Image (cartoon, helix red, strand yellow):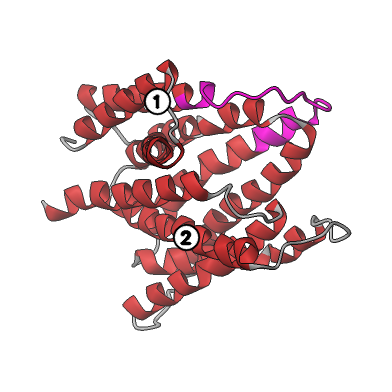
C-alpha cells in the first residue's frame, strides 16, 4: 500500500523544486547554453547521492543502461534543441507547443505499457492538460518569428520530452533501482556539455561574478533534485499520471512565488490553471 502512494510524494517533490526553479531560473545573468553546462554539472552531486544510496553498485545490465542513457539524452538533447529553437522563433509560440509534451507520454504509455486509469483518473489527466494550456496562454510575448525553422525544432523538443517520461518508465522496469537510472541520466547530460560549449558565443562578454555561474548553480541544483525525485515517481507510479501532474503543477508554485516576490497578479488563464492543477492533485491522490 505504501508504494502505491510513494509516486505522488516524489512527484510533489519534483513539483516544488521545479516550481521554485521556474520562479528564479531567469534571475542569473548568464548565457542559456552555459546554463545548460552548469545544470549538467549540478546533476553530479545528485548522482553521487544516488550512488551512495546503492553503495556504489551501479547496475550494468545492457538493456537498463541503454534505456537510462536514452532518458538522459532525450532530456538533455531536447534542452539543447530548445536553445536553437529560441534563436529562430518566439518563446510565446515555442513553449505552449512543448508544454503539452506529456500527451506523447500518455499515448505511448497507453499503447505500449497498457497503462490504464479509472474514469476519475482520466478526469485528472484532462485537468492537467487544461492547466498546461492555461499557463502557456498566460506567457505571451510580442516577439516575432525569424523563420519557420522553429516549428521543426520545437516539434523535436516536444517529441523528445514527451518520449523521455515513457522511456524513464521503461528504464525503471528494466533496472533494479531508480538510482542507477538517474546516474546514467547524469552521465548523458555531462556527455553533451561539449555541444553546449560549441553553441556558445564566446565573443560576447560573459558574467563570471556570483550572479552568473554561481547563482545559476544554486538554482539549477533544484532542477536536478526535481529530476532525481521524478525518477522515483515514475518507478512507483504510472507514467501517464506522473508526467502531466509534474508539468501542470510546477507553474502553480512558480506563480505563487512570483505573486509574493514580484507582486505578480495572476490573470484569468493562470487562475483557471491553478484551480485545474490543484484539482488534478486531489484526484491523483485517490488513484
Q: Position of residue 87 (x, y in %)?
A: 78, 39
Judge left or right: residue 18 versus residue 242. right
- Residue displayed at 51% across by 23% down: 138
Q: Quadrant of residue 66?
A: bottom right
Residue at the right extreme, as displayed: 203
Tell me whether circle 2 and circle 1 mark residues in contact (CB < 8 Å).
Answer: no
Task: Identify the residue under disc 1.
Answer: 131
Q: Residues within 10 Å of mark 1 (few under 14, many from 20)?
A: many
Label ID, residue 4: none
Q: Nearer the viewer, residue 170 or 80?
A: 80
Q: Position of residue 238 (x, y in %)?
A: 31, 42
- Residue displayed at 36% across by 63% down: 178
Q: Secondary structure at mark 1?
A: helix
- Residue displayed at 22% across by 22% down: 119
The answer to whether residue 45 is above or below residue 278 is: below
Q: Quadrant of residue 265?
A: top left
Q: Is residue 283 visible?
A: yes
Amino acid at each position: 500500500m505504501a508504494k502505491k502512494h510513494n509516486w505522488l510524494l516524489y512527484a510533489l517533490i519534483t513539483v516544488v523544486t521545479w516550481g521554485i526553479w521556474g520562479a528564479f531560473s531567469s534571475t542569473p545573468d548568464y548565457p542559456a547554453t552555459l546554463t545548460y553546462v552548469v545544470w549538467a554539472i549540478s546533476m553530479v552531486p545528485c548522482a553521487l547521492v544516488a550512488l551512495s544510496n546503492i553503495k556504489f553498485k551501479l547496475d550494468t545490465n545492457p538493456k537498463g543502461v541503454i534505456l537510462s542513457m536514452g532518458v538522459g539524452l532525450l532530456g538533455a538533447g531536447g534542452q539543447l534543441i530548445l536553445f536553437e529553437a529560441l534563436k529562430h522563433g518566439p518563446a510565446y509560440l515555442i513553449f505552449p507547443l512543448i508544454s503539452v509534451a506529456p500527451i506523447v507520454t500518455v499515448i505511448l504509455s497507453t499503447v505500449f505499457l497498457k497503462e490504464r486509469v479509472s474514469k476519475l483518473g482520466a478526469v485528472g489527466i484532462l485537468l492537467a492538460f487544461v492547466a498546461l494550456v492555461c499557463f502557456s496562454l498566460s506567457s505571451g510575448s510580442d516577439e516575432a518569428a525569424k523563420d519557420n525553422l522553429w516549428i521543426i525544432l520545437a516539434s523535436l523538443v516536444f517529441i523528445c520530452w514527451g518520449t523521455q517520461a515513457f522511456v524513464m518508465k521503461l528504464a525503471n522496469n528494466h533496472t533494479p533501482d531508480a538510482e542507477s537510472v538517474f546516474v546514467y541520466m547524469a552521465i548523458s547530460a555531462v556527455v553533451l556539455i561539449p555541444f553546449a560549449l560549441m553553441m556558445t558565443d564566446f565573443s560576447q562578454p560573459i558574467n563570471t561574478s556570483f550572479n552568473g555561474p554561481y547563482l545559476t548553480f544554486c538554482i539549477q541544483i533544484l532542477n536536478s533534485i526535481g529530476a532525481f525525485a521524478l525518477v522515483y515517481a515514475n518507478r512507483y507510479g504510472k507514467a501517464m499520471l506522473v508526467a502531466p501532474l509534474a508539468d501542470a503543477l510546477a507553474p502553480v508554485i512558480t506563480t505563487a512565488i512570483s505573486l509574493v516576490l514580484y507582486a505578480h497578479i495572476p490573470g484569468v488563464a493562470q487562475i483557471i490553471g491553478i484551480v485545474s492543477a490543484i484539482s488534478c492533485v486531489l484526484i491523483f491522490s485517490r488513484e
